[in-house]
Image (cartoon, rainbow, N blue to C red):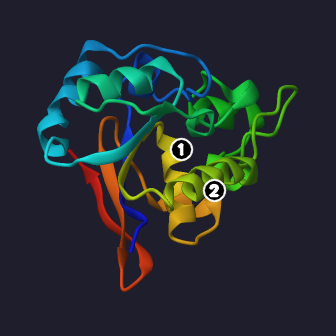
Amino acid sequence: MAGVGEIVVLRHGQTEWSRSGKHTGLTDLPLLPEGEEQARAVRDRLASRAFAEVWVSPLQRAGRTAELAGLVPTGTDADLVELDYGGYEGLTTAEIGTQLGREWSIWADGAVAGDTPGETLAQVAARVDRVLHRARPVDGDVALVAHGHVLRILTARWLGLPPEAGALFALPPAAYGVLGHEHGRPVLSGWGLR
């Protein structure tokens, strides 16, 4: 039966903002030298896979991670760009909480408060649903190289969960997960791998 085998989701390597905990949505930061080493480190783990498709976020940190991990992109996919944090861009969770005067979580509160609202989790879910719709008919494995929150939401949607369930799937820089099947059902086959 033709159709997607497994989907490997790879988060980009460390950047200055990911190291400091700042929310990095559309700001196009490069990898740190540490992030480049992290990306190279997964190369051997992924080398045994023959990917039918490799889709990459248009942001440079994802493209560079793909390159260093030995993945040759077959396409750039704007639907894989990180969540738009709006006015929360460049702020840490603690800084946002201080601004709001209360505890804040992207998973419970989203990025829609303030003068510059970002995306809702439902909007990101619609984007990743499109990615999954395009991936399902691919004959073979697919690699997706992107960002932490968008890949966590994509994983939740693969499993048939609401986007908020992405909170359950922490994914460190340059770590990857494997989305597979068992008895015809979508499953999480591996997570946080390096």
Tag 2's secondary structure?
A: helix
Q: Position of residue 26 (x, y in %)?
A: 62, 23
User: Which residue shows up at 47% across the image and 21% down it?
Assistant: 17
Q: Mark 2 = which residue?
A: 129
Q: Residue at x 28, y 32 (%)?
A: 71
Q: Please name the residue shown 39% across and 44% down the image.
A: 53
Q: Amino acid at mark 1?
A: His
Q: Looking at the picture, does residue 19 appear above or below residue 177?
A: above
Residue found at the very far bottom of the displayed protein: 183
User: In the rendered view, would you say 164 is above or below 175?
Assistant: below
Q: Which mark is residue 190?
A: none
Q: Tell me if mark 2 has few (under 14), some (14-19) or many (20+) residues whose alpha carbon lies within 10 angstroms of its own.
A: some
- Residue 68 at least partly seen: yes
Residue at (65, 24) in percent of width and height: 89
Disc 1 is placed on an element classified as helix
Counting from the top left corner in percent of width and height, residue 11 is at: 39, 38
Residue density around tag 1, few if under 14, some if 14–19, many if 20 or more, within 10 Å: many
